[in-house]
Image (tube, rainbow, N blue to C red):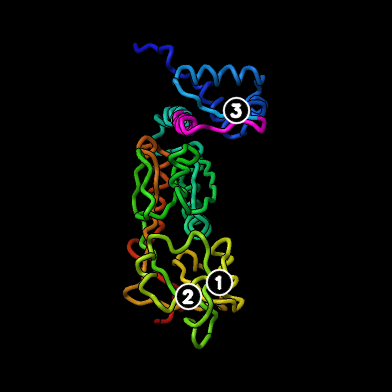
Amino acid sequence: MARTTDSDLAPRELRVLVAVADTGGFSAAAGTLGLTQSAVSHSVRGSERRIGAVLFERGRTGARPTPAGEKAVAHARRVLRLLDVLTSEARAAARPDAAEGVLRIAAFRSAALHLLPPVLQRLRARNPGIEPRVRIVREVGRGTAGEVADGKADVAIATLGGSVPLPPALVARGLLEEPYALVHPTGHAAPRSLPLVDWAENCGSYTRNWWATQDWIPKATVEAEDDGAVLSLVSGGHGMAIMPALSLAGAPDSVGITDLGAERPTRQVGYVTTSELAGSAVVRALVRELRATVPQGTSHLSGRADRA
C-alpha cells in the first residue's frame, strides 16, 4: 500500500487554500471554515513549505494568490471535486443508471437562457438525483472554459475554436455551428445605414476576418453590457447589430433578422470538461441530454429571417 509523504497535502489543507483564495483573506477563510486565523495561517505556511513556493501575497487588505498560488488553488479545487465525485460514483455503482450528486455548469448568457433550460428539464426528469448548479460567465478571455480549468465548474458550455487556446488537460466537443445575422428594427428601409450596437463578448476571432472585409459596418457607437441589452437597443430603433443565433432566440417582433448569406460568419458552440470528469456519471448524463436536445449541424436562424 502506498504511503503518504511529508510533501503530500491533505484535503483539509486544500480546503484552506481554496477558502483563502475565495474569501481574499486569512480571517475571512477562518470564519468560513470554522477555524481560527492562526490555524489557517499555519496551514498555509505548511502548504507553502511542502510545495516550495509562496502561494499568497499577504497585505493589509487581505491575501491574494501569487501565480504559483493560482495554479495550486486551481488544482486544489479539482482534487476536492474529484473526492466528491469519488463518493457519489461509489454510491451509484450498484445503480449504474441512476447518476446523482452536484453538477456545476458554467455557461455564457445566451446559452444559459436558450440552450440549457430544455436540457436541464430532461436531465432532472431522468436523473432526479443530480443537482445542477449554473453560473453565467462572460465569454471573454478565458471565459467559461477557464472556470473548468480553475476547478470552479465541472463542465462549461463554451464557444470553441477561438483565438484563446483551450487550457491544458481539458477536453472539448462541438454541439452546433451558430450563424451570425444582421439585426435591425423591423421594417427599416436601409438597416445597413444604421449605427452599430455591440457588446464585449461579440465579434471576436470567429468573425474578425469576415468583419474586416465588410466596409459597410461602421465602428460601434453604442456599447452595451450584453446581448440582451443589444436587442433592447435595436428594438428601440437605436441601431443595428451583428449577432449569433442563440442571442436571437425569442427576439421580439420589433426586431428584424436578416440572413447575411452564404459567406456569413459562424461560431462553434460546444462543451468543455476535464479529462478526469469526462467519465463521471453526472457529466455523461448532461452530455447525453445536450446531444439529444441540441439540433445536429447548423443552428437555424429565426423563421422570419430575410435575405441580405
From mark 1 to mark 2, how far is it between C-alphas? 8 Å
Q: Residue at x 52, y 57 (%)?
A: 109
How far from the left and from the top, in percent, is residue 216?
A: 43, 79
The answer to the question of whether label 1 and label 2 lie on touching residues, with beta carbons closer than 8 A, is yes
- Residue at the disc numbered 1: 221
How far from the left and from the top, in percent, is residue 60?
A: 67, 30
User: Magenta segment: does it hold 75?
Assistant: yes
From mark 3 to mark 2, how far is it between C-alphas? 47 Å
User: Which residues lie in the magenta part?
Assistant: 60-79
Whether residue 139 is situated above or below residue 20 in the rendered picture: below
- Residue at the disc numbered 2: 218
Whether residue 167 is situated above or below residue 245 in the rendered picture: above
Residue in the foreground of this view, choosing between 187 and 209: 209
Whether residue 119 is situated above or below residue 53 in the rendered picture: below
What secondary structure prevails in the magenta region?
A: helix
Residue in the foreground of this view, choosing between 175 and 38: 38
- Residue at the disc numbered 3: 58
- Quarter of the image with the C terminus in it: bottom left
From mark 1 to mark 3, how far is it between C-alphas? 43 Å
